[in-house]
Amino acid sequence: MIFPGMVDAHVHLRTPGGEHKEDFRTGSAAALAGGFTMLLAMPNTQPPLVTLESWQNAQTRAQSESLCDVFLYAGAPANHMDQLPALAQHAPALKIYMDQTYGPLYVRGLANLMPIFAVWPAAKPICVHAEGESVALAIGLAAMYKKHVHICHVSRKSEIELIAQAKASGLPVTCEVTPHHLFLTDADAARLGPYGDVRPTLGSVEDQEALWQHLNSTIDCIASDHAPHTREEKEQPEGSPPGVPGLESTLPLMLTAAAQGRLTYTRLIELLSTNPRQIFNLPEQADTYVEIDPAATYTFPDHPLYTKCGWSPFTGMLMTGRVQRVVLRGQEVVRDGIVLNYR
Ligand code: DOR
Ligand code: ZN
Ligand code: ZN
């Protein structure tokens, strides 16, 4: 099967400041091996991308060091509000951390959120890390400021049901879910220990079933939330950083679901390519496509992983469907699942 280049609108590539976990080269190689030709990378780096200068430095490096197209989010500042108008001109979207998670970015309280919503332009999405009640707060702000809010990694039944109601009321809200919330539950979290620790945490079977029920309606995109941390960091006795890698497992998992009839291949392409390109107004990639063998069965991973962290919470899963070949702007960059001219 021939697919368009997949787009992952939510990844953490760790440059600058976390290059021992991942960098633009290793992260973008993992992307290509996983069928993604375009990434949107998060601003919770060190330093975080909350000033025009830090954003431009990182975007310049992304362009020169990546093997696929990489665009960077601007981070919502708690203390650099003066930077927002300039960031809004350059970055494709804004990211607001409305709940505490990995990294330094966290914007708390209405008094801090309202001016951000007032300043950010309506034409570019405001993406939010919002859990539980924060989802309702984000939807409320979308309604009051008439700004497009994109809710990241929706993980709970109550959240997806509230988003469905917001969309039915015509509010400018879109959302994404991750494969780890579709394929893993709190039972897996107990089995995986630190390797299943992620924010939002893995939900119950009931949460998981609700996400699947909304896959053909409420959910706009699948995004990996690729969040690599080293094995050493994950096994720290004093507490491990949350996050799981996903760039190389996302398309295999969704192909497996398609092979099992849980969604159509047409819907898969909407969720992983057409919709994120439209939501984030991303540029065309001419002569770019992915060749899939939808019938290949294997135990994941069947090659050494390209992500620098070197592990996956999906190791040992039986997959149906494999990325064979990737062509980016007319150039073959993956053959037989191997990233060319790389190792
Ligand atoms: O588990 C997570 N890890 N959730 C986030 O929101 C951040 C991410 C990271 O950057 O590691
Ligand atoms: Zn998040
Ligand atoms: Zn994330």
Image: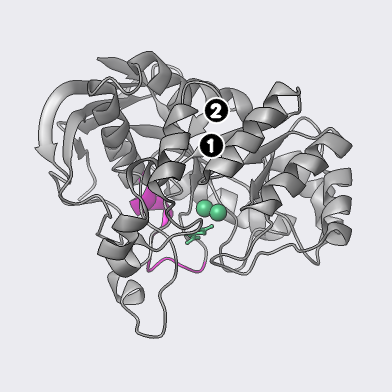
Residue that appears at 80% across and 42% down: 140
Q: Which residues are magenta?
A: 17-28
Which residue is painted at 25% across and 59% down in the image?
311
Whether the residue carrying mark 1 lies under 8 Å from ligand 3 is answered with no
Image quadrant assignment for residue 230:
bottom left
Measured from the top left, where is residue 177 in percent x and y?
49, 39
Q: Please identify the quarter of the rendering in which residue 98 is found.
A: bottom right
Q: Are circles 2 and 1 on residues that touch, CB within 8 Å?
A: yes
- Above or below, 217 against 206 in this view is above
Q: Earlier in the sequence, mark 2 or mark 1?
A: 1
Up the image or down, 64 lies above or below 213; here it is below
Secondary structure under the numbered disc 2 in the rendered image: loop
Magenta stretch holds residue 111: no
Local packing at callout 1 (Cα closer than 10 Å; few below 14, some 14-19, many 20+) is many
Horizontal side of 55 relative to 325 (left or right) equals: right
Kind of residue sitting beneath label 1:
Glu
Label 1 sits on residue: 176
- Asked if residue 261 can be seen in this view, the reply is yes
Residue highlighted by disc 2? 220
Q: Is residue 281 visible?
A: no
Q: Estimate the x, y position of residue 68 in percent, counting from the top left.
A: 41, 38
Residue 186, image x and y in percent?
Answer: 37, 56
Q: Amino acid at mark 2?
A: Asp
Instruction: Quadrant for residue 90, please give it.
Output: top right
